[in-house]
Image: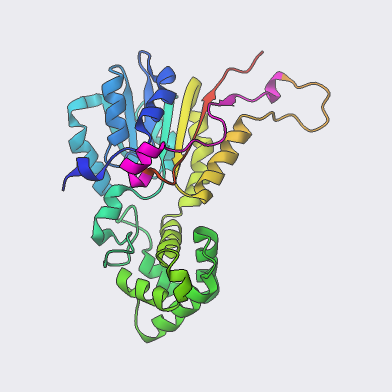
Amino acid sequence: MDFERIHTPVMLDRTVELLAPALDREGAVLVDATLGMGGHTRAFLERFPNLTVIGLDRDPDALEIARERLAAYGDRMRFVHTVYDGIARAVRSEGFREVQGVLFDLGVSSLQLDRAERGFAYSKDAPLDMRMDFTQGRTAADVIAEESEDELKRIFLDYGEEKLAARYARAIVRARAEAPITRSAQLVQIITAATPVVVQRQGHPAKRVFQALRIEVNEELSVLQDAMPAALDTLAVGGRIVVLAYQSLEDRIVKRALQAAASSSAPAGLPMELPEHRPNFKLLVRGAEQASESEQAENPRAKPVRLRAAERVRRPS
């Protein structure tokens, strides 16, 4: 497989630009919390010769590929098999108390989408798996088989923001009563049959259902809610965090976490803000940044991305 072709890091130049002031120093450490195939990390290792990177990933396939692609960097590169809410434990396990940078590139990876047998893509027939760590946990087929109609509706509505959630949940429950739903093509056929023709013209009807199942299987939103404060706590003063999110549910969690960290904690009505109430983070970009039109044209995965960033600052005494 041509990994250079399938893996083009999103907003790479901007990510390097934002993290550079924190990483361009002796002994700097970056946590790539979503290592994938190592595209972002390789650029950082090349740009900053004194940098050590701790790469986290829950996907054993991704870690294996990253080890091969990044072998030339020796012990400047550390690999940890973990979900990214384990960031604090991972940093300690590698012998560090704090780090100078954290990068999150959220969502499903190019590797997972392109390997049909993983079951992430609605355009390819495969077993309904969708586990980012295929060594443990429930599969998407398990969710489809075990959850009630009401729970399936909730999953599709909450995690896919799917307007036809009730219709799809009902169709799935009816179909599974006749035969197990174990493959992506089966699920796509059921969803398509339950979708009005006028809606089908607006885009692939299974897109949001597959997104919702993937989020449910991998507990992505609850993991991210825990990971954001843990990541902020690992940053040294002057350390920076950059997060790339690809759908609104993730971006909302990131936005709230960074805004809370950059806001005063003083109770309402206090006449004077005490030093301990002053924020210890500042936002580095206004709102969320998007990829440029040229990058979106070159890399379709960049179209929905929203970038947010913050820096840890020293509270005044």
Does the rendering let one see residue 93? no
Which residue is found at the position 30% from the left and 48% from the top? Answer: 110
Q: Position of residue 76 (x, y in %)?
A: 27, 24
Q: Is residue 263 left or right of residue 134?
A: right
Residue range in magenta is: 275-301
Q: Position of residue 6 (x, y in %)?
A: 24, 45
Q: Position of residue 65 (x, y in %)?
A: 21, 42
- Residue 299 shown in magenta: yes
Return the residue nearer the eye: 284 or 45. 284
Question: How did the renderer colour the structure?
Answer: rainbow
Task: Locate the C terminus by quadrant.
Answer: top right
Q: Is residue 281 left or right of residue 307?
A: right
Indicate whether 258 appears above or below 151: above
Which residue is found at the position 40% from the left and 39% from the top? Answer: 293
Q: Position of residue 144 (x, y in %)?
A: 41, 71
Q: Is residue 173 left or right of residue 13?
A: right
Indicate whether 277 appears above or below 209: above
Quadrant of the rendered image containing residue 49: top left
Q: How many marks?
A: 0
Does the rendering let one see residue 115? yes
Quadrant of the rendered image containing residue 3: top left
- Residue 118 shown in magenta: no
